[in-house]
Image (cartoon, rainbow, N blue to C red):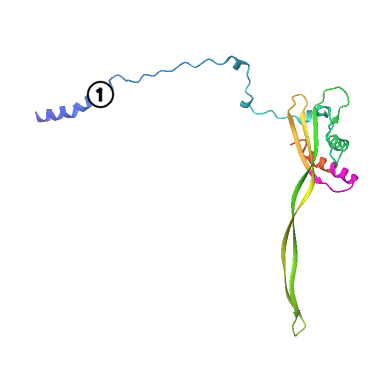
Amino acid sequence: MRRLCLILLSVGPLYLGLAACSSPNPYVAASAPMPPAPAQAANTFDTSAYPAPVRDYGAYRNWAWRNGQLPAGTAWADSAQVAEAVSGALDQRGLRPLHDNRPPDLLVSADVRLEKRLKQVQDDYGYGYGGYNRYGNGYGMYNSVPIVRTYEVQVVVVRVNLFDARSGQPVWSASAETGSQGSLSERGDALRQAVQKAMTAYPPS
């Protein structure tokens, strides 16, 4: 009888656990239906989901001034000088100006402005002392003290902007700067060199 009681006592919790597991689950799975897509979704293309297409710069063959206007001039260089420098740089890269009513491939704008820069120059000034010993040989000690001077200079910044004529989107832009000093002819040479420097990276690789 003692063994029977022990067996019943050990088996009892197992039956209780099984009975608890067989009880109904109070949690019921339920889901709401997905809302319908908006009407404009069928006609909307998400461009952010796709990489931007590679731009074919070789397709650009000719150009015209944006809004039909020459670049604005300044007291340092007039409008005609800026236009001539930009046109020459574009021509060297195979881009020809249009002089008729055909639609161009590119629209071009350019601007020239004067800006100020801070420059630093380090000068080394030497100092020392010397003399002669009883053998007649000279001796001495020399050193240098670096002196940093900061001064303001004026530079000319030239920027060239290219736009796709069909979409109006900017496709390329660059700038370069040059010194603002010199005669009228020297300014013209500096302007052309600055534009050439700005156009060096076109077309981008």
The quadrant in which the N terminus is found is top left
Judged left or right of residue 27, residue 51 is right
Residue 61 visible, this angle: no
Task: Write down the quadrant of residue 91 in the picture.
Answer: top right
Q: Residue 45, relative to residue 113: is it above or below?
A: above
Residue linked to disc 1: 18
Q: Position of residue 52 (x, y in %)?
A: 67, 28
Q: Which contiguous range is marked in magenta?
A: 177-191
Q: Secondary structure at mark 1?
A: helix
Q: Is residue 21 above or below residue 177?
A: above
Which residue is pictured at 25% across the width and 23% down the height? Answer: 18
Whether residue 19 is visible here, answered yes or no, is: yes
Residue at 24% across, 26% down? 17
Quick check: is 138 in the magenta stretch? no
Please state if 40 lies on the left or on the right of 139 as rendered.
Answer: left
Q: Residues within 10 Å of mark 1 (few under 14, many from 20)?
A: few
* Tag 1: amino acid: Leu
**Residue 158 % position (x, y):** 80, 40
Q: Position of residue 160 (x, y in %)?
A: 79, 36
Q: Is residue 186 magenta?
A: yes
Quadrant in which residue 69 is drawn:
top right
Where is the C terminus found, in terms of image quarters?
top right
Q: Nearer the viewer, residue 150 or 101?
A: 150
Q: Residue furthest right?
A: 185
x, y percentage for residue 57? 77, 31
